[in-house]
Image (cartoon, helix red, strand yellow):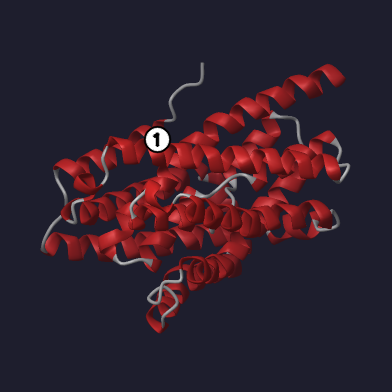
Amino acid sequence: MRKIDPFLTALICAVLLATVLPCKGNATLILEYVTDACIMVMFFMQGIKLERRAILENMRNWKLQGLVLACTFLLFPLLGVSLHALAPGLLDSNTWLGVLFLCCLPSTVQSSIALTSLANGNVAASICAATLSNIAGIFITPVLVSVVLHTQGVWSAQAITDIAVQLLLPFVAGQLFQSVLHKWVHRNKKIISITDRSSILLVVYTAFSHAVVEGIWSKLDLQSILSLVAIDVGLLLLVLLITLLLGKACGFPSRDEVSLILCGSKKSLASGVPMANVLFPASIAGFIILPLILYHQIQLFLCTLIARHYHTKHSSDV
């Protein structure tokens, strides 16, 4: 039986705290400045941690890397738009925005690599795919959000400035200082991980505080939440099936197939939460990140089962 992820528990607690004790008034302004600073630190650390060498060494497997990017930035948005067109009344408009935003996000890094390792898959290819996805996502996700959501305010001059200042510049700075700080970051992985997760929790609390003030729980009843879970599960299962079929159609060896499935089906909470904070008004940010928070745990649970299946398969082949 899989243990409950402590980070998931912390996320739930952040949502509950915002529900019971939402941030209001002047405290909200202070918290917004703090969250902006935390987001910049997070992307600075991402710039240090994401290695360019890992991408260059594995780009020779262009078919696998191209398919992961296609699944992440083409397949997901197409499925999200199709589901919305088929059943627009299942969710309110803001929560649908959150589902579509989820579809535009890059893949995860840590969990994709960890689960590929558990499955005895092609870890080097997964490192390349996840890293490339996150670097590309800084540029591609805002454009996709603007195209998929058709929102006039997302791709405004102010949004471009916010993306540059809070996401792109810190990331580029992290890349520039990578040679100097890379060893320090790896020596202090636990501290960095706690800092990253604490920053995400703070952004979640701030976003949900705004959402509670805007009446999120009066607009989302139990049926809406169950519908949202069903949509998240449906999206993940569709992508898992399609990536499996693509891997077999391309004749990938089993270990490359694992990388395609586990990297191509993931969505990054670490990138998604701060991006939502930058791209969307505070009044709807809580609605936007709720589908992502649910998807995060669903993907960890189902992909862990898949990784264990491949681990058993590869172990028996040895």
The vertical placement of 180 against 215, above or below, is below
The residue closer to the viewer here, 83 or 262, is 83
Could you tell me which residue is drawn at 54 percent across and 48 percent down? 267
Q: How many C-alpha atoms fall within 10 Å of the one at disc 1: few (<14), some, or many (≥20)?
A: some
Residue at 24% from the left image edge and 54% from the top image edge = 211
Indicate the amino acid at tag 1.
Leu
Q: Position of residue 18 (x, y in %)?
A: 21, 46
Disc count in the image?
A: 1
Query: Residue 88 in the image: x percent, y percent?
Result: 42, 53
Residue furthest to the bottom in view is 157
* Helix, strand or loop status at disc 1: helix
| Coordinates of residue 270 in the picture (x, y in percent) | 47, 51
Give above or below for 114 relative to 55.
Answer: above
Residue denoted by label 1? 8
The residue nearer to you, when weighing 136 against 227, is: 227
In the image, taking residue 252 as reference, residue 222 lies left or right, namely left
Depth check, front residue: 62 or 79? 79
Query: Horizontal placement of 306 versus 199: left or right?
Result: right
Q: Quadrant of residue 24?
A: bottom left
Q: Where is 73 relative to 112, above or below?
A: below
Report whether residue 106 is seen.
Answer: no
In this rendered view, identify the residue nearer to me: 172 or 102: 102
Q: For the point 43% across and 62% down, which residue is it?
A: 275
Q: Residue at x 14, y 60 (%)?
A: 27
Q: Position of residue 60 (x, y in %)?
A: 86, 57
Residue 159 in view, yes or no = yes
Image-quadrant location for residue 117: top right
Q: Quadrant of the C terminus?
A: top right
Q: Is residue 39 left or right of residue 179?
A: left
